[in-house]
Image: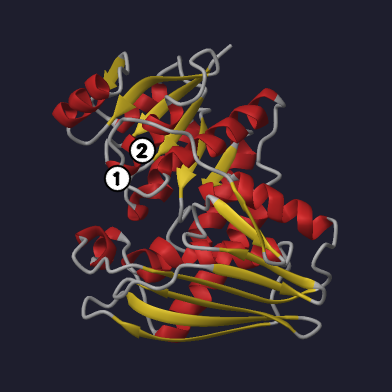
Amino acid sequence: MATKWGICSAGKISNDFLVALATLPAVDHQAVAVAARDIDRAKDFAKTHSIPKVHGSYEELAKDPNIDIIYVGAVNTVHLDLVLMFMKNQKNVLCEKPLAMDCTEVRELISSARTHNVFLMEAVWSRFFPVYHQIRSLLTQNVIGEVKVVRAEFGLNLLHVERVVQKELGGGALLDIGCYCIQFALMAFNGEKPESITAKGFLHETGVVETVTIIIQFAGKRQAILTCSIAVELPNQAVISGTKGTIQIPSFFWCPTSLIVNGKETNYPVPPTTKQLYFLNSTGLSYQAEHVRQCLLKGLKESPVMSLAESELLASIMEEVHKQLGVTYPQNQH
């Protein structure tokens, strides 16, 4: 039986998710319905991606009985309300990162998922790339010894993108791209809670984070140094340094196609497509979709690779960084 996907929002990331889905066997994955705030946009989107059903509201999508899981590609600020509504209607949910605007909201979503006994996962797609799978395997085998220093940087000039600079839309370097750096460090340190978090950076004139460097310290003299920026392009690499060697992901570490282990490089190309994509290597979203299918087939309520506990830790670290830089969002007034 195919996993039947409902698509919430007809934006760019939803487009890429569906292009990625189309690289997988149709017997395994089907997009059966789409909803957007603008019905005409939803209709155009449905036509482009051959989706049989269009809903004029997210409420209708929530009540559609023919859906196994809903993919939420809407703006950050509406994640909480939409995901809560879907879960209350007994729908499994794959929600784009950040899962919500702060730790309080993330905890509310986790609690609701457990109450309604549905699957919930934050769509940290990087985790499901073959490169990341390989890294976890190498770390488990202790190939580079004890991990001591992790570095990651994600910088692109996105100051012209309204969604990224507007506070009302949940913008800022941290929520949008910094989360990739933090999740990478958390993966390298096996989801461990840090001893301390230090953040230094600058805000954009709109009050969101423009550039920030975060030092996360863990017990046993281990640390992660992470830089993210929406003002400049950075080398966009990541390195895990251990007592016996290094694992390096060349540019672009969040959607990687190659891995260098102790100087030896291996390539892992993403699935090919001829369809329009808005983001880099985004046919790689297919790895995440297939992982979700496997979780659902096993009856799991969360992913062993991107657990809800890790989503909560990720949110708490971002919240601390925002606090240190003096950033608040309207949502933070709980």
Q: Amino acid at mark 1?
A: Tyr
* Rendered position, 33 above or below 183: above
Mark 1: which secondary structure?
loop
**Quadrant (top left/top right/bottom left/bottom right) for the C terminus:** bottom left
Q: Return the x and y of residue 75 as percentages of the image width and height.
A: 32, 50
Outermost residue, front side: 264
Pick the front one: 314 or 116: 314
Query: Residue 42, image x and y in percent?
Result: 22, 28
Question: Residue 112 vs residue 159: left or right?
Answer: right
Q: As drawn, which residue projects farthest toward the left?
A: 40
Mark number for residue 155?
Answer: none
Q: How many marks?
A: 2
From mark 2 to mark 1, how far is it between C-alphas? Answer: 7 Å
Q: Earlier in the sequence, mark 2 or mark 1?
A: 2
Q: Which residue is mark 1?
A: 278
Q: Position of residue 108 (x, y in %)?
A: 54, 52
Residue drawn where x is 50% and y is 57% of the image: 254
Q: Is residue 201 above or below residue 210?
A: below
Q: Could you tell me which secondary element the residue under label 2 belongs to?
A: helix
Q: Quadrant of residue 92?
A: top right
Q: Is residue 178 left or right of residue 46?
A: right
Residue 192 position within the rendered picture, expressed as x and y whole percent measured from the top left: 73, 67
* Badge 2 density bin: few <14, some 14–19, many ≥20, Cα 10 Å: many
Q: Is residue 222 visible?
A: yes
- The structure residue drawn at horizontal position 34% and vertical position 43%, both measured from the top left corner, is 13
For disc 2, the marked residue is 16
* Residue 333 is at least partly visible in this image: no
Closest to the observer: 172 or 331? 172
- Tell me what residue is drawn at x 20 percent, y 23 percent: 43
Do labels 2 and 1 touch, CB within 8 Å?
yes
Q: Tell me the amino acid under the disc marked 2.
A: Asp
